[in-house]
Amino acid sequence: MEKTKILVVDDESRMRKLVKDFLSREGFVVLEAGDGMEAMDIFYKDKEIALVILDVMMPKMDGWQVCREIRAHSKVPIIMLTARSEERDELQGFELGVDEYISKPFSPKILVARVEAILRRTQGTDNEDTMAAGGIVVDKAAHTVEIDGAPIDLSFKEFELLTYFMENQGIALSREKILNNVWNYDYFGDARTIDTHVKKLRSKLGVKGEYIKTIWGMGYKFEVEG
């Protein structure tokens, strides 16, 4: 079996080495870039990159610009690294389609766990796993969503969130439970992370967004009327 390729983009060589050492130990092939322009060159040349770990603050082309450019061509999962733990940075990352967001300093073991969790979900789906409810059809293998026969474009996390909601129709889900299942790790951040994703998901679902009910003080419930 081919080894999974991960692109690590950071202008600090020590940080790249740290991340590379931990990922290589787990059997990943790690490609490195020291700035955003070098990262895009590598990304365009190598079509087998399965995940990108991206620092925000870099010379020539920062992480936000790299993220925008990648998202214009690809849905490859992106983990964003930043030294600043400001909420507006985190929300901007999610707006651009970032899948995970990790503030420095961080535990390399936690980073590896998140990488593995994302790759399990993007690479390890059943071949005939489709779900339908209220005109929404989710194909977990193809990673596609259709509403009344028309395809819609969801980010990786929005897709995971919708899938989790549909798998738990009619069940009240706390924010903590959603974080633990969709993000697949114990998240010690703000529940607004979920609220941001739910807001975007509802918007993309159009009138079907009403299926996602807010349960005040707790979380959400996916319920199709009638």
Image (cartoon, rainbow, N blue to C red):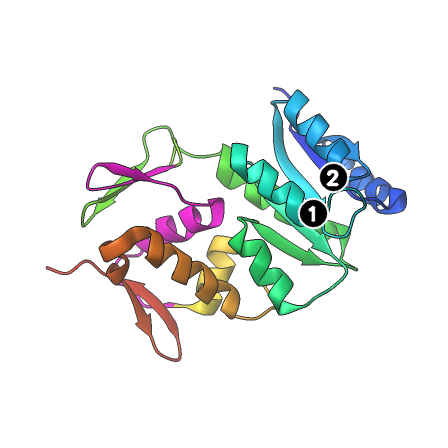
Q: Quadrant of residue 127?
A: top left
**Is residue 148 located in the magenta-colored stretch of the structure?**
yes
Residue 6: x and y in percent read 68, 33
- Label 2 crowding class (10 Å Cα cut-off): few <14, some 14-19, many 20+? many
Q: In which quarter of the image is residue 35?
A: top right
Name the disc covering residue 63, or none: 1
- Which residue appears farthest toward the bottom when viewing the image? 217
Residue 197: x and y in percent read 45, 59
Q: How far apart are marks 1 and 2 (CA)?
A: 7 Å
- The answer to whether residue 26 is visible is no
| Kind of residue sitting beneath label 2 | Gly
- Which residue appears farthest toward the right when viewing the image? 14
Residue name at image x 39 percent, y 32 percent: 141
Report the span colored magenta: 144-173
Residue 46: x and y in percent read 66, 22
Q: Are marks 1 and 2 in contact (CB under 8 Å)?
A: yes
- Which residue appears farthest toward the front when viewing the image? 60
Name the disc covering residue 36, or none: 2
- Label 1 crowding class (10 Å Cα cut-off): few <14, some 14-19, many 20+? many
Callout 2: SS:
helix
Residue name at image x 47 percent, y 63 percent: 196
